[in-house]
Image (cartoon, rainbow, N blue to C red):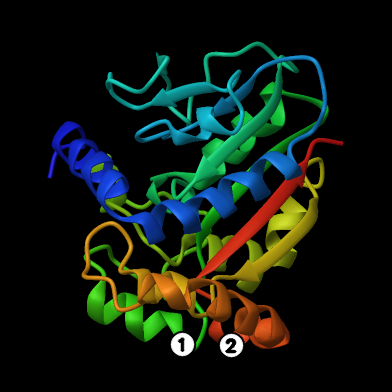
Amino acid sequence: MELGPALAAQEQAWNERPLVRRQYSEWYRAIVAALADLPGPTVELGSGIGKLKEFKPDVVTTDVEPTLWADAVVDAEALPYADGEVANLVLLDVFHHLADPARFLDEARRVLAPGGRVVIVDPYCSPLSTPVYKRFHHERTDLGAQAFERDELTSTAPLESNQARATLAFYRNRADYLRRWPELPIVSDRRFALLVYPLTGGFTRPPLLPTLFYSPLRSVEQVLQPLAPLLAFRCLVVLERR
């Protein structure tokens, strides 16, 4: 599916699915809480239907193609910003769409001001989530891929991806990441979305969770948080420019 129709379908799902709105609203609040408080723009890459603006109105929304929701067209692998100009880069469900994550990380290191941050929310491949992603999600999940090499399959279209990319880059190959980008250390990371997210059905599948059970299951998730490495469907990773 092309980007425009895909985003239109996503907006329709957002309007029709209260559980998805509630889940993603929690994630947007977590993103805003992780941002650096610095002069300079906060730029969201691959901002989709632009809902981060509801939580941070001054964010610059961007996408790889012109859309109804993007303030600018921006290529994450060739950022149109001067050295040290940007306060924050936000990627929600975008990192796994990058064809060349090493180029993006080089660009992030260049454009971020000292103390500036990259805030990433992306799929996490746990023992529970990996088979679910492979069986029920239309995007590819390849834990055998190279963490930082260019992925020719992902480069063919904006919506192509490897959902394992953040798991490979920031968890399984963390030592390699820290060796290659010491100026962008990981200052925090969290694995989450253990129960509620898969049961909401996301943007495309039928929900399995009655609205009434949302809050009780979120409480259960908090109790189960120590098991997040085994159960999580999402991760939040924060990099900071040193």
Query: Which residue is the extreme one toward the front?
Result: 212
SS at circle 2: helix
Residue at 35% x, 70% y is 141
Q: Is residue 94 above or below residue 203?
A: above
| Residue type (three-letter) at the residue carrying disc 1 | Leu
Relative placement, left or right, of 217 versus 183 is: left
Q: In this view, does 22 lie above or below 2?
A: below
What numbered label is drawn on residue 72?
A: none
Q: Dot 1 lies on which element?
A: loop
Seen from the viewer's position, the closer of residues 102 and 118 is 118
**Residue situated in front as seen by the camera: 171 or 208:** 208
Residue 230 badge: 2
Read off the residue under disc 1.
128
Q: Can residue 141 be seen in this view?
A: yes
Residue 135, quarter of picture: bottom left
Q: Position of residue 157 (x, y in %)?
A: 22, 41
Q: How many marks?
A: 2
Which label's residue is closer to the chain start, 2 or 1?
Answer: 1
Query: In the rendering, at what x and y percent does residue 198 appear?
Result: 39, 74
- Contact flag, marks 2 and 1 (Cβ < 8 Å): yes
- Left or right: 188 with respect to 82? right
Quadrant of image for the C terminus: top right
Residue 174 position within the rendered picture, expressed as x and y whole percent measured from the top left: 70, 65
The N terminus, quarter of image: top left
* Residue type at the position of mark 2: Leu
Mark 1 neighbour class, 10 Å CA radius: few under 14, some 14 to 19, many 20 or more? some
Specify the quadrant of the image occupied by residue 108: top right
Q: x, y (%) of residue 206? A: 21, 70
Q: Is residue 159 visible?
A: no
Residue that appears at 37% across and 76% down: 199
